[in-house]
Image (cartoon, rainbow, N blue to C red):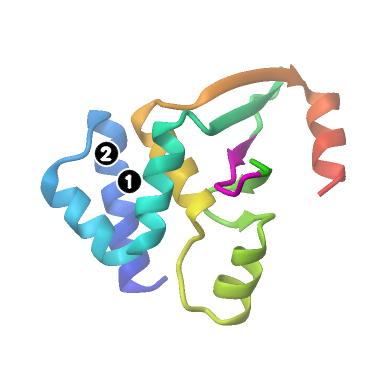
Amino acid sequence: MSASSLVAESLWKSIESTRSVSEDQLSTLYFLFGKNLEKATRIVDQRGVKTISGEPSSRFIFQVMGESRRKEEYYCFAEHYCACYSFFYDIVNKGEQLFCKHQLAARLAAALGACIEIKVSDEQLALLLAKL
């Protein structure tokens, strides 16, 4: 794991424990993620992050609103995957970023307790995941 990833992980844990972001934390997050963080905060401010949880397992995936006029939504696992084009282009292919804006929005919303929660059956969640 890179030093940047370790710093980011430490920040997320700190934010989760207090459910708030200090100026220093925000400055460090911006240093690590730049404009993607700005875009992610807009998504969180617009209540654009949903957590879809399966019952009874409590397994979940995030559904994050895009910023285009079409307002598409992307499924993502905040730490590992996003279905958006930027994830594959900037992160997987080029390795230029640690996370896309949707992953950052999911992490930030989860840390702040700002997700809209949707409960579905485990079967419904499995069907949703099978489409990815």
Quick one: quadrant of the N terminus? bottom left
Q: Is residue 116 magenta?
A: no
The alpha-carbon separation of the residues under discs 1 and 2 comes to 5 Å
User: Label 2 crowding class (10 Å Cα cut-off): few <14, some 14-19, many 20+?
Assistant: some
Q: Looking at the image, how many numbered discs can be counted on the residues?
A: 2
Residue drawn 51% across and 51% down? 103
Residue drawn 36% across and 61% down? 35
Q: Which residue is mark 2?
A: 15
Q: Is residue 64 above or below residue 92?
A: above
Q: Amino acid at mark 2?
A: Ile
Residue drawn 41% across and 59% down? 36
Q: Amino acid at mark 1?
A: Trp
Q: Where residue 24 appears, x then y in whole percent?
A: 12, 51
Q: Which residue is mark 1?
A: 12
Q: Describe the element under mark 2 as helix, strand or loop.
A: helix
What are the residue bounds of the magenta stretch? 61-69
Q: Is residue 27 left or right of residue 108?
A: left
Q: Is residue 76 above or below residue 19?
A: below
Q: Is residue 67 magenta?
A: yes
User: Label 1 crowding class (10 Å Cα cut-off): few <14, some 14-19, many 20+?
Assistant: many
Asked which quadrant contains residue 117, the reply is top right
Outermost residue, bottom direction?
Answer: 94
Q: Is residue 16 above or below residue 70?
A: above
Q: Where residue 80 appears, x then y in whole percent?
A: 58, 57
Q: Where residue 109 appears, x then y in whole percent?
A: 42, 35
Residue drawn 59% across and 46% down? 66
Asked which quadrant contains residue 30, the reply is bottom left
The reply to whether discs 1 and 2 touch (Cβ–Cβ < 8 Å) is yes
Q: Where residue 94 appears, x then y in whole percent?
A: 56, 82
